[in-house]
Image (cartoon, rainbow, N blue to C red):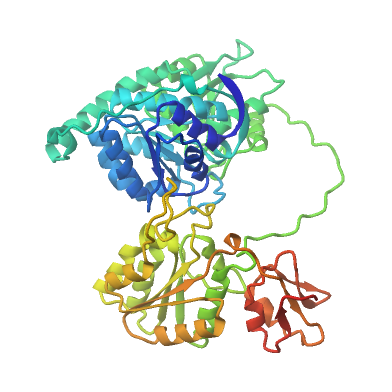
Amino acid sequence: MHQEFLMGNAAIARGAIAAGLNLVCGYPGTPSTEVLETAAKNNDGGLYVEWSVNEKAAMELGAGAAYSGARSMVTMKQVGLNVASDPLMSLAYIGVRGGMVILVADDPGPISSQTEQDTRSFAAFSKLPCFDPSSVQEAYDMIQDAFAYSEQYHTPVLFRPTTRICHGYASITVKDPEEYYINKPEGFKKDSSRWVIFPRLSYQAHINIEARNVELQQVFSQYAHNRITPAADAECRKGIATHGVSAAYTAEALQGKDAPRLLQIATPFPFPEQLAVEFLRGLDEVLCIEELDPVIERELTYLCGKHHLNVRIRGKLTHDVKNAGENTVASVSENIAAFMGWTLPEAPVTDTPPALPVRPPVLCAGCPHRASFYAVKQAMKGKKTVFCGDIGCYTLGNAMPLDMVDTCLCMGAGVNITQGIGRIEPDTTCFAFVGDSTFFASAITGAVNAVYNQANMTLIVLDNSTTAMTGHQPHPGTGRTMMGQVVDKVSIEAVLKGVGVKTVETVNPLELEKAIHTVQRVAAEDGVKAIIFRSPCAVLIKPDAPSFINKESCLNCKRCLQLGCPGIILRDGKPEIERSLCTGCGLCAQVCTFKAISLGGEN
């Protein structure tokens, strides 16, 4: 054993490798992405690593490996679990042979997500065991336990870190390579009574699952990471129940104080009933501090009724703790102080710091998506249009002054939402914008639906040759895999033509005039048609010399500001190019009516 300073996601990946991981796959999504990337970086050649096209594909791949006796891990964020839920719900009934861990990183806040889903609630819904680490060290240790329990009980298990665990850093104790568990898969053994799901099999599986979870309630009551800490004052009749990173916040809030009795839950499902009842006995009231759903609060309330315990359970349901957003040390301190009747010390009087500048998220300087949006906007001037967006960097096209994203729901949804709007408003020119990675992940079926049902729409594929928003991971269109292979690129043009889209045109959006004319011509056609705007992400290329504005030629019309580029600023009321940001993409020079902007040179 030795010490290392690791990010939570890195600790999880290292712990999984120490547990004998044979295969890891997933789809990138913050805050989970670094788990798979760390596994790839620490691959000694015996581990198969894959970015799958979406979470459903990853779930099924991981299941096949676990059927064969491998230890597999599937990684995603909480909204990705929605995509993977179809195979997962059935997999809960079928079970596995090798250990299979589904890592689902939740995002309280939310910080970078559409929703604040709580995977602990999904665990109860799917009847799958769930592990909920409270620190980087626990994440490292518990991922190894998760594989062991999965293998012992022949079930996939959920592993639920949250953003502050995933992206937190700590110095932790890790195993030396010679201490790693080595798992040697035996291979798939044919048995249709085991691996082919039928109603009769499912009925018996359901009975077995319920019995297993009753057993796990007892087993988890003895699990080391579920624990009770006695009150500092033996006469104290108050308790606090918590979990995850909120347990760390609770510990910090209680420093230097006579702490009440504490219950920390590491396995929210099956809930450790016997341990919880032991915690409740002799208490008058309990405060539950958790993110996001009142999972612990509901369980304790139920147990009080079941075991006839006269304990008042407080938390989100009683409005003693906020019921949305992430917890903080400050919010937890306030909750505990109110519960315990303590007075918080007054904050010291200090000079008021200057207000921070407002920095809303924005497309990068030189981002080709800006040119794509602008080209469509100019081409459709004066027409009744709707622009349906999707999940990715290009969602930021909703911001002013571009204002080019009218809807955004979930990955791939824009293609079908466009069709729905078009059916109700046939006089509207409908566009769906989707990125290249999202096209492969979840938009192809929408294109098939549009062709089959004779929709009238224009699909815009924003191809910047990477999965940019989550850190530039490869996808089927890049020609690279996470195993380092160079493979044939999957052609977006060929896919679209293959499903029946007759008009498919590709254009560089930074060739603005050509892009505008292409949109005008293609959008005027009937039926389903597609334009692929192809230009690499600005982060992936070496920037050209920055543009400059000739102050004598500039008439201060401010048309260049309509691009919303952070590289164009106002100084003394006139546009100026910030050289440190400009990539020299040349879009602003093409927009300038008076030719006052040139590429390269000096201001």
Residue 477: where, in percent of width, then height?
A: 41, 61
Residue 181: where, in percent of width, then height?
A: 41, 22
Give the quadrant of the N terminus. Answer: top right
On screen, residue 589 above or below 298: below
Left or right position of 196 against 182: left
Residue furthest top as drawn:
234
In the figure, residue 369 lies in which quadrant?
bottom right
Q: Is residue 154 visible?
A: yes
Residue 162: where, in percent of width, then height?
A: 52, 39
Of the pair 564 and 302, the residue shown nearer to us: 564
On screen, residue 497 above or below 174: below
The residue under the point 39% across, 43% down is: 25
Q: Is residue 225 visible?
A: no
On screen, residue 278 above or below 574: above
Q: How many marks?
A: 0
Residue 208: where, in percent of width, then height?
A: 22, 27
In the figure, residue 401 lies in which quadrant?
bottom right
Of the pair 95 and 111, the residue shown nearer to us: 95
Give the quadrant of the C terminus. Answer: bottom right
Of the pair 493 and 427, the residue shown nearer to us: 493
Left or right position of 139 against 67: right
